[in-house]
Image (cartoon, coloured by chain):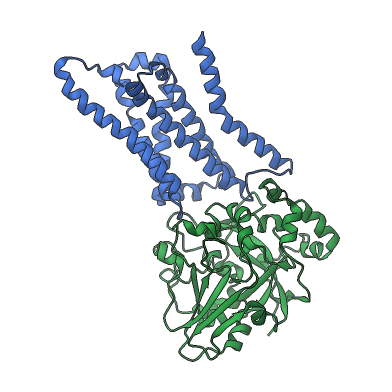
Amino acid sequence: MRLSYIKAVVHFLALLPAAWLIWQGWLLYDGQDNLLTANPIKYIHHYTGDWAIRFILMSLAIMPLRKIFGWNIVIKFRRMMGLYAFFYVILHLLNFVVLDYYFDWPIILKEIIKRPAITFGMTGIILLIPLAVTSTKGWVRRLGKKWVKLHKLIYVIGILAVTHNFMMVKADIFQPMIHISILTLLLGYRLYDKFRAGKKTYTGNSNFLQRN
Amino acid sequence: MLFRFLKPSDVKSAEITPEKIYHNRREFIQATVGLGAIAALGLDSSQAQAQTKLLENITPNAAYSTDEKLTSFRVVASYNNFYEFGTKKDDPVRNAHSLKPRPWTVKVDGHVENPGDYDIDDLIRPHDLQERIYRMRCVEAWSMVIPWVGIPLAEIINKLGPTSKARYIRFETLVDKGQMPGQNSRVIRWPYVEGLRMDEAMNPLTLMAVGLYGRDLPNQNGAPMRLVVPWKYGFKGIKSIVRISFVKNRPRNSWYLKAPSEYGFFANVNPKVDHPRWTQANERRLGEFRRRETLMFNGYAEEVAHMYSGMNLQKYF
């Protein structure tokens, strides 16, 4: 019962960025002052991309939080973080295809293929699709251990996302470097944990499924 | 010498000619009172207005102006790449109030007959101010149409008298962390440096701008004087200039130094030479929804293409 309240609050918080965007978009449409700058499409692009990365990082932070602080409850929010990452990255893609290039497929395809940064980003989005699809309880049950394996793709997606972010920036690499640092810490912790668990396996304390 | 400047590709005669609107002061004031973006950023519109004063005796130069729809003052003055005040587009409008555009001294040196430290007013005032409405194409694939006020750079150069050794002209922006807080971060090497080949500098299109929309340049647009080279990407338009040098060798401009594979010295607008990370075939005119095709030399081919005949523009981008 209490968990469902917390979940509602987390949903509310996770939707706030989208709500803010809709509000600002409405102000723009209505000809009022807004914070989307004189180039709203570019602004929306950065905004949705940043939030997608933040949710990817949050989903990757669940396991270390649980391990380090013993907060078992956070595991209940991992799927949610992943799905909100998917939600914001789809907004990011829609902005690219619809608002920015307005279905100009030849140019869109050329950009995806020719620009390594966009190729990385697009690959990350495509890899995120099976994770979103198999995020339901039914799929977790059906796939069993394979599900765990499949969802390790999020490590690759995280790397692709921050690389894309870093490569798209013209000069001020401050923010992408923050994303890269956080990702490095989160993935680094996993390596450390694996190493530690590997040692512990002899004492029989390791539980593969629980760890993931 | 005065030829008709517009080509079929850029004549949009059906569009309103908004320069008329802004020459009508009353409507202009009404329009600028809605400086909403600026207001939203914490500057109220009266402050924004008070920042700049009206310039006198400006002659509109129709022969060198496009009649495309102007980008609003609000957009021109609130969406800027001016890393000396921060790297976000709305950083300059927030932070540029710390810049003091007067008194302002410009150092002139190198292969030139009249070197020295010039007060900006001595440099500019002897010449008649012209208004020129130019397209501005940013390397980031967005564009504006801006009514600049300034004088042809050639007039300044002729007065300074470069010697035959001068093959390039090199400009520097002010370095002053107190006035330019963005310089506390080393995103690019300070001072910002730009340059032109001498024939490019002497081209009648090249403008030393001191104002826009009939007023002094807002600080965030490069007060008190900045370069405008409309057939090149916007980063060639160096702002808040404190030094003009006549040099023998090609200056190494800031963005070239930052990423030589992405930003060249020439930086001519060219839809056929993509930026490594995005297409340059099209652009978004700010205020418009759909992208439009980018024109060779930003639509100024008739006036400038001859300077590059025989040059491999894929190589010298």
**Who's the residue at 54% across and 38% down the image?**
A94
Extreme-right residue of the structure: B26
**Does residue A190 sit above or below B32 in this rendering?**
above
Instruction: Provide residue B72's location: percent of width, then percent of height.
Output: 71, 57
**Who's the residue at 41% across and 42% down the image?**
A178
Q: Check the picture and name the quadrant holding the C terminus of chain B.
A: bottom left
Instruction: Provide residue A185's location: percent of width, then percent of height.
Output: 33, 35
**Who's the residue at 61% across and 83% down the image?**
B156
Q: Check the picture and name the quadrant holding the N terminus of chain B.
A: bottom right
Instruction: Provide residue B19's location: percent of width, then percent of height.
Output: 77, 65
**Does residue B102 sit above or below A148 in this rendering?**
below
Instruction: Provide residue B151's location: percent of width, then percent of height.
Output: 67, 78
Q: Nearer the viewer, residue A66 or B100?
A: B100
Colour that chain A carries in the picture = blue
Q: Nearer the viewer, residue A179 or A85?
A: A179
| Res B217 seen here | yes
Colour that chain B carries in the picture = green
